[in-house]
Amino acid sequence: MKTFFASRRRLATAGLLLAGFAVLSSQQTAAPKKGLKDYYKDYFPVGVAVGRAQLQGPEAALIKQQFNSVTPENAMKMGPLHPEENRYFWADADAIVDFAQANKLRVRGHNLLWHEQTPRWLFKNADGSRVSKDVLLKRLHDHIFTVVKRYQGKIYAWDVVNEAIADNPQEFLRNSEWYQICGDEFIAKAFEYAHEADPKAQLFYNDYNTERPEKRERIFKLLKQLKDAKVPIDGVGLQGHWSLQEPTEPELRAALDQYASLGLKVQITELDVSIYPWEKDRRAKRPDESDAYTPELARQQAAQYKMFFRVFRDYKKVLTGVTFWNVSDKYSWLDTYPVAGRKNYPLLFDQNQQPKQAFWEVVQF
Ligand code: G3I
């Protein structure tokens, strides 16, 4: 008798498990009926970084279905947008803004000042010597006025200054050409010029590794200095180039608490979850380096994404946007960084624009 009931129980349990698995796997192979933007409509806009190449075909369809905000991945950076002092290249940036307008997507502008992707002419006089602080600030002013005014009313938020904090924990500001020529003044000036050009645009400072405690303190110090000096800054962008290893939940919560304590809006501006540990220095690919996206990596990544979005929902009063850096695993900047020839799989959609396990974890709450 006992054996009869025990085996019936075992059968019932197996049945339940199978049914559960069937529900999960049918859901995981199904196309999502709603977009991330719909699941999160009571929380925050969900955005994605795009280039012109993604504005047509299956990726464009996915963008329209899933997101309600876009950020130009490269098109609005000073190098591509302003290649010569008296020449702007608007075609790519305009195409993205037009696509957004046509499809009722918000646009985050990225970015007005960065140490990377700067045009060659920017820091030099005609004779090749280095420009003075006055000349550089005038160039910055003219650039910001031209760009911000062109998209006034179409771009609701700008990353005004990107990555001004040094990588070396012993230093405060990055020793960039901006810093070498202007000292720390370029930061406040960039915000002032942007505010003057479009008083309604929300202005952000944007950086990476913003949850690592020592860098968090240095970023906090900069933001506090700007707030105390009444510089027109509205928020801080946490890029969110994260991995299976970091940040931990306590680190993420501590960062959101600390930045929000300044009364700033917080956005996650460049989210992706690398399957490799974070590294900065470019290097050659090692012969033994596998780039297989194993089921175990997919599981760990889904668990990370699940945790991140649980925390984001808890901070709905502080977080005013979450943007992914690239559309699907078909193309990620991490495919070539910091090692070329090694594929990464950091997003919620696979190489065929199908939702991954991580997608379902993010939308089930
Ligand atoms: O446009 C040129 C093209 O003319 C040339 O033929 C080609 C050859 O390599 O390069 C093209 O430029 C590349 C550019 O992306 C556009 O595709 C650059 O080499 C490449 O370095 C550049 O990478 C971008 C990177 O910023 C620059 O540092 C990535 O796409 C972009 O995703 C990345 O984005 C940054 C954020 O702006 C700030 N936070 C970090 C994030 C990731 O690095």
Image (cartoon, rainbow, N blue to C red):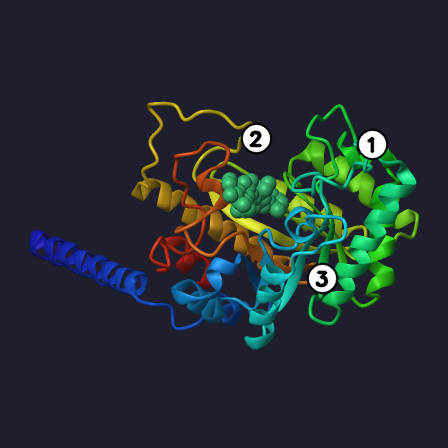
> On residue 157, which mark appears?
3
- The three-letter amino acid code for the residue at tag 3 is Ala
Q: Residues within 10 Å of mark 1 (few under 14, many from 20)?
A: some
Q: Earlier in the sequence, mark 1 or mark 2?
A: 1
In the picture shown, does residue 360 fall above or below 139?
below
Q: Quarter of the picture for ligand 1?
A: top right
Residue at 48% across / 70% down in the picture? 64
Residue at 47% across / 39% down in the picture? 244
Q: Which residue is mark 1?
A: 130
Q: Which residue is mark 2?
A: 280
Closest to the observer: 145 or 309?
145
Residue at 83% across / 32% down in the picture? 130
Closest to the observer: 151 or 342?
151
| Residue 288 seen in render | yes
Closest to the observer: 154 or 166?
154
Residue 335 placed where, x, y %? 44, 41
Q: CA distance from mark 1 to mark 2?
A: 28 Å
Label 1 residue near ligand 1, CB within 8 Å: no
- The three-letter amino acid code for the residue at tag 1 is Arg
Q: CA distance from mark 3 to mark 1?
A: 32 Å
> Under tag 1, what secondary structure?
loop
- The three-letter amino acid code for the residue at tag 2 is Lys
Residue at 88% across / 52% down in the picture? 231
In the picture shown, does residue 34 fall above or below 337?
below
- Mark nearest the camera among 3 and 1 is 1
